[in-house]
Image: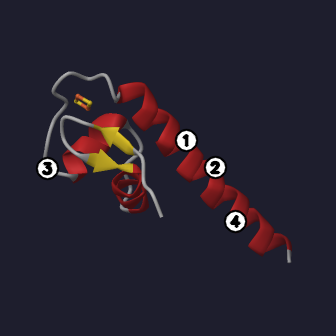
């Protein structure tokens, strides 16, 4: 499985963002804090936000499907 690097400066990949979201992170800043760092260049902010949204959408969909069963 190939994971896309989201933050090159801090070496945070998709799994790292998903782990942070699972721990309660809901913003790019919170993802950085989860990993014990801060933004350097900030160019990853949009991609990180999109990955957070996709992760949350996937969990809501999964929860909704389970609840509907
Ligand atoms: S790519 Fe994330 S701070 Fe630079």
Residue at screen point 26% across, 23% down: 42
Label 3: few (<14), some (14–19) or many (≥20) C-alpha neighbours in 10 Å: few
Sooner in the amino-acid sequence: mark 4 or mark 2: 2
User: Which residue is the site of mark 1?
Assistant: 53
Query: At which x and y percent is residue 54?
Result: 58, 45
Q: Is residue 5 above or below residue 47?
A: below
Marks 4 and 2: CB-CB under 8 Å?
Answer: no
User: Which residue is the site of mark 4?
Assistant: 62
Query: At which x and y percent is residue 51?
Result: 49, 42
Residue situated furthest bottom in the rendering = 69
Sooner in the amino-acid sequence: mark 2 or mark 3: 3
Residue 10 as seen in the image, left or right of residue 68: left
Sooner in the amino-acid sequence: mark 4 or mark 3: 3
User: Which residue is the site of mark 3?
Assistant: 36
Residue situated furthest front in the rendering = 2
Label 2: few (<14), some (14–19) or many (≥20) C-alpha neighbours in 10 Å: few
Q: CA distance from mark 2 to mark 3?
A: 25 Å
**Residue nearest the observer in this picture, 33 or 12:** 12
Q: Is the C-beta of the residue carrying label 1 under 8 Å from the nearest atom of ligand 1?
A: no
Q: Quadrant of residue 2?
A: bottom left
How are the colours assigned in the image? secondary structure
Q: CA distance from mark 1 to mark 2?
A: 6 Å
Sooner in the amino-acid sequence: mark 1 or mark 3: 3
């Amino acid at each position: 499985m190939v994971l896309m690097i989201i933050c090159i400066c801090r070496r945070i990949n998709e799994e790292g963002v998903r782990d942070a979201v699972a721990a309660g992170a809901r913003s790019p800043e919170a993802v950085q804090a989860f990993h014990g760092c801060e933004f350097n260049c900030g160019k990853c902010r949009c991609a990180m936000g999109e990955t957070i949204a996709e992760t949350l959408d996937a969990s809501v969909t999964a929860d909704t499907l389970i609840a509907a069963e």
